[in-house]
Image (spheres, coloured by chain):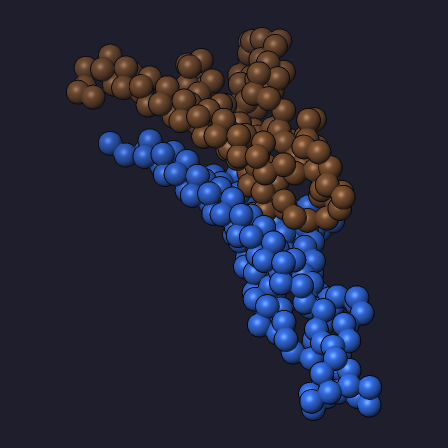
Chain colours: A blue, B brown
């Protein structure tokens, strides 16, 4: 049974990490037009317990994408400088959508493992019946 | 008591092995996007089962341990021998092959449980009880 416990824990941590990633993707998309916004990047780390990998995953600290912000020409914008430019955000919608898709796929894979582990432990416990 | 019958012992070992492998697959899938993670697996059932039962020992005294008592221990996890292609961030998990492994694990576990259940039914019948 302890193996089932570790698989369920691993699948749950995977789903949590992917959900956090998806949340940051949606934050980025929501702020795609915010001037001066830098897109957030989520990192994944394997969890270590007493120096050993325990198979779980967690999201590391959120970092900001350091690519240069694009200069957008719009003299009527309140933030525009003397030349008529202001700094936009470095969010690329194509990258965000691709990231969201990948997060969704990984989430589904983890969910499938969760389901399967549950089925297996259920069958095992059915042996005790009768 | 059921350990003494080879078929129960084999089925229980196979179920234990499937559970251990399931745990390895779940961990790999959870870490499918972790940079630098190396895919893990457990040795095949044929290898682990044979290692335990290759040299059949007999207990001639009460204090002796039979190898059968260690058969139910889950095999240790190793780095996968044939992992998927390494992605640029050093991760070697391939979701597709993990899915295939998961299907194999499910089949192995179902097989073990079914054999165990059927053997139990035969045992019950031989005791003269209704199944």
Q: In which quarter of the image is the C terminus of chain B?
A: top left
> Which quarter shows the N terminus of chain B?
top left
Res B65 seen here: no
Task: Tell me the residue at 58%/58% (across/down).
Answer: A97
Residue B50 in sight: yes
Return the x and y of residue A123 as percentages of the image width and height: 36, 34
Horizontal side of residue B26 vs B120, given as left or right: right
Task: Tell me which residue sits at (58%, 50%) in the image.
Answer: A102
Residue A113: x %, y % from top left: 49, 42
Q: Is residue A69 left or right of residue A123?
A: right
Residue B109 position in % (x across, y down): 44, 27
Give the image quarter of residue B97: top right
Up the image or down, B53 lies above or below A102; here it is above
Q: What residue is drawn where x is 53% and y is 52%? A: A104
Location of residue A49 with respect to B25 vertically, above or below: below
Q: Nearer the viewer, residue B57 or B120?
A: B120
């Amino acid at each position: 049974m302890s193996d089932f416990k570790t698989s369920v824990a691993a699948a749950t941590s995977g789903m949590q990490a992917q959900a956090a990633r998806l949340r940051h993707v949606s934050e980025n998309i929501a702020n795609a037009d915010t001037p001066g916004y830098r897109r957030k990047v989520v990192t994944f780390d394997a969890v270590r317990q007493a120096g050993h990998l325990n198979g779980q995953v967690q999201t590391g600290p959120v970092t900001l994408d350091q690519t240069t912000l694009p200069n957008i020409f719009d003299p009527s914008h309140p933030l525009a400088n003397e030349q008529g430019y202001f700094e936009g955000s470095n969010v690329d919608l194509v990258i965000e959508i691709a990231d969201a898709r990948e997060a969704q796929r990984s989430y589904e894979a983890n969910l499938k493992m969760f389901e399967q582990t549950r089925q297996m432990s259920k069958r095992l416990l059915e042996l005790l019946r009768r | 008591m059921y350990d003494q019958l080879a078929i129960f012992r084999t089925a229980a070992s196979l179920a234990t092995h499937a559970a251990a492998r399931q745990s390895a697959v779940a961990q790999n899938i959870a870490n499918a996007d972790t940079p630098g993670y190396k895919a893990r697996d457990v040795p095949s059932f044929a290898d682990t089962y044979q290692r335990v039962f290759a040299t059949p020992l007999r207990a001639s005294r009460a204090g002796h341990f039979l190898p059968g008592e260690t058969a139910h221990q889950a095999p240790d996890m190793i780095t996968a021998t044939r992992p998927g292609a390494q992605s640029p961030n050093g991760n070697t998990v391939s979701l597709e092959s993990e899915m295939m492994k998961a299907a194999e694990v499910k089949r192995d576990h179902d097989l073990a449980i079914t054999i165990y259940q059927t053997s139990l039914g035969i045992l019950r019948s031989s005791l003269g009880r209704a199944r």
